[in-house]
Image (cartoon, rainbow, N blue to C red):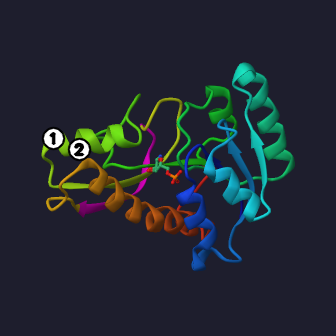
Amino acid sequence: MRISVFVSGHGSNLKAILNYPDLKGKIVVKWVITDKPHCKALDIAKENNISSYCIDKEKIAEEYIYLTELFKKDNIELIVLAGFLKLLPTTFVNNFKKRIINIHPALLPSYGGKGMYGMNVHKAVFESGDRESGATIHFVDETYDTGFIIAQEKIDISQCSSPEEIAASVLNVEHQLLPEAIGKIADGKIKIGV
Ligand code: GRF
């Protein structure tokens, strides 16, 4: 299965996908896409000889038309948002219905939506006093974090004494949950595009 991964941060989820033994021979990461030209995730793409493309934020509409044509030409079957923080244009989402997944570092539908990313999520969870958090994989639609949930993993955070500790524990879960979900999609256990 040919996939494209959208990133904007450290790229630890991209790295987890590339290094996940069960995905070897099952998937090929053909493109890494970002809108942050200096993000560390681009270094990971380069180290792994993966083509990358940086979206020009001054011409979003044209850029997503270009990416749509590129992905159709390259037969990209799955688009994975791994730390990509922007909303995708509705036209782009509709061109890849049920073929775009996102990983969110909390138990959606809680702690999701506009502005809920990175440490904002873990600070909100910490302040709530919740004893559990976790990660969620969902299909992407035209609004933040509202698509159909395809995988979720809970962890006990009652021993975490800071939002940073929650973030680290959740990131460990992400690095397992995301590659696993991609493997299930590649195996046809999770249906896409329908
Ligand atoms: C992860 O916490 C993910 O849940 C969120 O952004 C972060 C990406 O981290 N969407 P990385 O760039 O993959 O290290």
Q: At which x and y percent is residue 2?
A: 74, 60
Residue 120 is drawn in which quadrant? top left
Q: CA distance from mark 2 to mark 1?
A: 5 Å
Which residue position holds label 2?
125
Residue 154 is drawn in which quadrant? bottom left
Above or below, 36 relative to 91? below
Q: At which x and y percent is residue 128?
A: 15, 41
Q: Quadrant of the N terminus?
A: bottom right
100 vs 132, left or right, is: right
13 vs 42, left or right, is: left
Query: The disc labelled 2 sits on which kind of residue?
Result: Val
Above or below, 25 relative to 84? below
- Please report the residue visible at 68 percent of the width from the left and 32 percent of the height from the top: 92
Q: State the SS at label 1.
A: helix
Q: Which mark is residue 128?
A: 1
Q: At which x and y percent is residue 70?
A: 83, 42
Q: Residues within 10 Å of mark 1 (few under 14, many from 20)?
A: few
Label 1 near label 2: C-beta < 8 Å? Answer: yes
- Say which of 115 and 154 sits in front: 115
Query: The disc labelled 1 sits on which kind of residue?
Result: Ser
Q: What residue span does the magenta drawing correspond to?
A: 146-155
Q: Residues within 10 Å of mark 2 (few under 14, many from 20)?
A: many
Q: Is residue 79 shown to the viewer in this render?
A: no
